[in-house]
Image: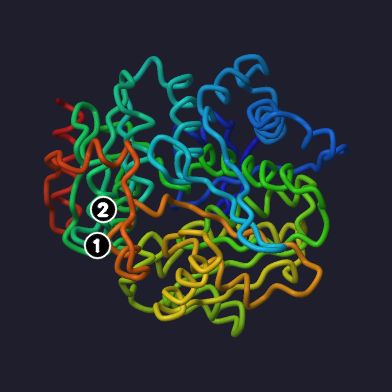
Amino acid sequence: MKLFNLKLPEQQVSFQQAVKQGLGKNQGLFFPEQLKAFDDIDALLSQPLAVRSATILQRLIGDEIPAERLQKMVTRAFNFPAPLAEVKDSIHCLELFHGPTLAFKDFGARFMAQCLAEFAKDEPITILTATSGDTGAAVAHAFYGIDNINVVILYPKGKISSLQEKLFTTLGGNIHTVAVEGDFDQCQSLVKQSFDDDETREGVHLNSANSINISRLMAQVCYYFEAVAQLDKREDIVVSVPSGNFGNLTAGMIAKVLGLPIAHFIAATNVNDTVPRYLKTGDWAPNPTVATMSNAMDVSQPNNWPRVEALFEYGYLDKSILNSVAVDEQYTQLAMRELLSEGYVSEPHAAVAYKALKRQLEPGQQGIFLGTAHPAKFRDTVENVLGQPISLPQELAECAGKESLSESLAPDFAALKAHLFEVAKA
C-alpha cells in the first residue's frame, strides 16, 4: 500500500517511510492511495479486538508488515479494553480511557511505538510532538525506555491540567518535556517549523507522534469497529466525536469507508469552533484560540482537517454524513451534571460530545459518544462542576506527588532548535 502527500500527490511513500517521516514535503499529510471496504463486516465484528484490529490494519497497510508480525505488534499495543457503556436508552459512551495513561491516545501512541521500534533499529530518532493534554502522556509512556528513540514533548505552560502534566513530565530518561510560554497552536507551529528546517529535520532525525502521523491515525480506526461490535442492533448509528485536532473524527470516517455501518458523524467542538462555522458558511476563518475546561480541544487550526476533506474530494464519502456542533462552557457543565443524573460520571471533553449528540439525535437512532479520558485526569474541574469528590486511579495517584522535570521555553524556534540538538547529543 502506497501513501501520498495531500499537498504534493506526486510524493508517494511506503507505510514505513510515512511513519518515520511523519509529514510530507510542504507539511503535507500522508493519505492511503486507496481505501477498500471489507466484504463481510459481521464476520469481522465477531472477532476479538486484537485479532480484528490486525485484520483492519493489514487492509490499511498492505503486505509491508507480515501478518504474523503485525498481529504481535497489535497484541502488544492493544492490551486493554474499550468497553461500550450504556448511559441511557439508545445512548452509549465508548470508553477509550482504560489504557496505561487513561486516554484514547494510548491506542495510537502504543501502535506507533511498536511501528517505530520495528522500523528504527539502525538509526537514532528524535520524536517531536505537541500536546494539548493527553497526547503527551500517551506518547511518553508508549516510547519510554525504547532504545534509539528520544522524545521531546511541547505543551502550553499552565494550560493543561496538573494531573495531565504530571503523567508525562515526571518520567525522565529518554522523555524530554518543554513547557512553552504560549498556547497549543504556538506549540504546533514550533513543531511545523522544526520539520520545515532541513538542518533540524535531518540533524536530529526528526519524527512526529502527533495525530498527523499515519500510524496513530490508522490505530484509531480500530476502536470504532470495537464500538459497533458491542451493539446488539447495528443500524442507524450516530457517533459524536469530541474534536480538537480532528484525527479522531478522521479515523471514524475511514472506518465507515471500510464498511462499518455508521450512519452519521457529529464533530463536537468547544467554543474553538472553526469547523462548525466552516461547514455552515464555507469560510475557513480561525479565531484566536480560547482556553476552555475541555482543553485538549482548544485548537483553532486543526491539523487533520485536510484528511477529512480528502475523504470527500476523492469520493469516499458524501458531505451529508457529517455535521459539526459547538458547545460552550455553560452547556458543557450542564451536560456533565445531566450525565451524573443518569449515574454516569464524565469529564468535559466527553460531555461536549454528549451534548452535541443530544442536540442532533433523532428518534429511532442509536447514539455513541466518545469518552476520551478518565474523569480523574480533570479532577479539579469535575469536582467543581459536580460538587462531589473523584478518587484517583492508581496510574494518577502514583505520579501526583512527583516533581516535574520540564524545561520552560519561549515560543521561539531558535531556542527549540538548540534544545533539540542538545537532546540528540545527550
Q: Quadrant of residue 404?
A: top left
Question: How many numbered discs, if any?
Answer: 2
Name the residue located 47 percent from the left edge and 21 percent from the top edge: 119
Q: Position of residue 257 (x, y in %)?
A: 75, 50
Tell me the SS state at disc 2. Answer: strand
- Note whether 213 is above or below 380 in the view shown: above
Callout in the foreground (1, 2): 1
Other-residue count near label 2 (Cα within 10 Å), few / some / many at <14 / 14–19 / ≥20: many
The answer to whether the residues at label 1 and label 2 have Cβ atoms under 8 Å apart is yes
Q: Position of residue 92 (x, y in %)?
A: 64, 57
Q: CA distance from mark 1 to mark 2?
A: 8 Å
Q: Residue furthest right?
A: 39
Describe the element under mark 1 as helix, strand or loop: loop
Kindly identify the amino acid type of the residue bearing the numbered disc 2.
Tyr
Residue depicted at x 19% and y 44%: 417
Residue occupying the point 58% across, 17% down: 72
Q: Tag 1: Cα neighbours inside 10 Å, few (<14), some, or many (≥20)?
A: many
Which kind of residue does numbered mark 1 sit on? Lys
- The x and y percentages for residue 363 are 78, 74
Quadrant for the C terminus, please. Answer: top left
- Answer with the quarter of the image where residue 329 lies: bottom left
Instruction: Locate residue 409 relative to residue 163 in the image: left or right.
Output: left
Give the image quarter of residue 382: bottom left
Whole-percent x, y for residue 16 in the image: 53, 28
- The residue at the point 83 percent across, 57 percent down is 235
Pointer 2 residue: 155
As rendered, which of 269 and 356 lies closer to the eye?
356
- In the picture of the structure, the residue carrying the numbered disc 1 is 159
